[in-house]
Amino acid sequence: MIKLVKSTFYKEKEIKEQLCKFIKDTEILSMNKEVKQFEEEFALWQNCKYAVMVNSGSSANLAVIQTMINLGKLKIGDKVGISALTWATNIFPVIQLGLKPIIIDVNINNLNIDINCFKSVLTRHDLKALFITHALGFCSEKLDIIKNICDKKNIILLEDTCESLGSKAYNKLLGNFGLASTFSFYVAHHLSTIEGGMICTDDKDVYNMLKMVRAHGWSKDLNKDIQTQLMKQNKINIFYKLFTFYSLGYNLRPTEINGFIGRKQLPYLDEICNIRHKNFIKINKYISENKNLVSFDLKHLSLISSFSIPILCKSKNACDKIKKKFIKAEIEVRPIISGNIQKQPVLINKNPIMKKNRKLPNADMIHECGFYIPNNPELTDEEIQHIIDVIKNA
């Protein structure tokens, strides 16, 4: 079986040995120096000013929405654009925190928000934010135009980059186009810390608020000048300095174990992303040549750090037949993310905001006619050729 994920993290055996020693030798395993160092190193790699680590990519999405509310950038009832092809934890925080999700259809040639659908939504809805999802290592071919529209209309652009770490559009890393971006370090993702996530931003106020949101609304992770300023503003006695809550927050803290693994993975990240890119280019050539499959238009991407290989068929009948061929060939398959997010029962049955379904024909097609197959940095040449042979005969 060619599995979607082969190991817990890259270079697993040697890093596990280093991890065992680290655990034995380290006195403090709750969030401390390793996490802080990983944040600094990741920000440098991502080419941004600030990075805040949390305990999952899901928590990263929750934290960034709560931060926007805490800073007054969003308020209860505001409308937030969401991609129709996304993971539950992109839309859930929007609903849970009292905002209204407006689902936007995607382009079948890159699986990301379609510019014309976005423009159409803007004629009917006053969006205050756009929480875009860079699906499977791809992004919209009009991401630059989407950003310009958001800038002109004062729409906060946020990037869920959990599946696209390392991908570049216009020679710029995804995650550097909006006010803040989120990343996942779950086992199946490009960089794994087993569980973990990160939020990146160039905005200092967002950075400081994220650190409070991550840890109960405390100020203890902020620098001393800001701590003193908050104490004076709120007339806090020195005795309560470390036990005062200044904002709504959660406990989203990672551990030193997560930070340590992240630091050990980071030197391999360029290698990981480049292998995923090469695998995708090699396999996608045969997808493009197959008359039963949709070709992807990704010329705007200079590096495709592919999370997996999407197979989008031109009909449901073709999809059913081709999917069976992959299963018979012992190649693991699964839906493209979770299909059209609007079709999820929790949104259909239990949330009044979502009762009226919007027409999302492209997301519907992906839901009915798509699935994805493995792309990980541990695929062998033989496995890649096996995948290609199935595509050629599909």
Image (spheres, rainbow, N blue to C red):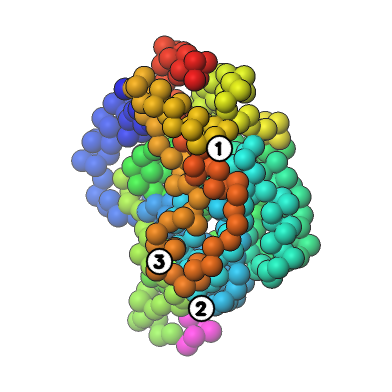
Disc number placed over residue 349 in the picture, else none: 3
Where residue 137 is drawn, which disc sits there?
Answer: 1
Sequence-wise, the earlier of marks 3 and 2 is 2
What's the amino acid at mark 2?
A: Leu
Residue at 78%, 62% (x, y): give it: 152
Segment colored magenta? 229-235
Residue 232 forms part of the magenta stretch: yes
Instruction: State the residue in front, 146 or 229.
Output: 146
Residue extending farthest bottom: 235
The first of marks 2 and 1 along the sequence is 1
Relative to 182, does residue 247 appear above or below in the rendering?
below
* First along the sequence among labels 1 and 3: 1
Q: Is residue 88 visible?
A: yes
Within 10 Å of the Cα at label 2, are there few (<14), some (14-19), or many (20+) other Cα atoms?
A: some
User: Which residue is at a point 73% across and 45% down the rendered structure image?
Assistant: 142
Where residue 13 sits, quadrant-wise, is top left
In percent of width and height, residue 385 lies at 46, 13
Mark-to-mark CA distance, 1 and 3: 31 Å
Residue 376 position within the rendered picture, expressed as x and y whole percent measured from the top left: 44, 28
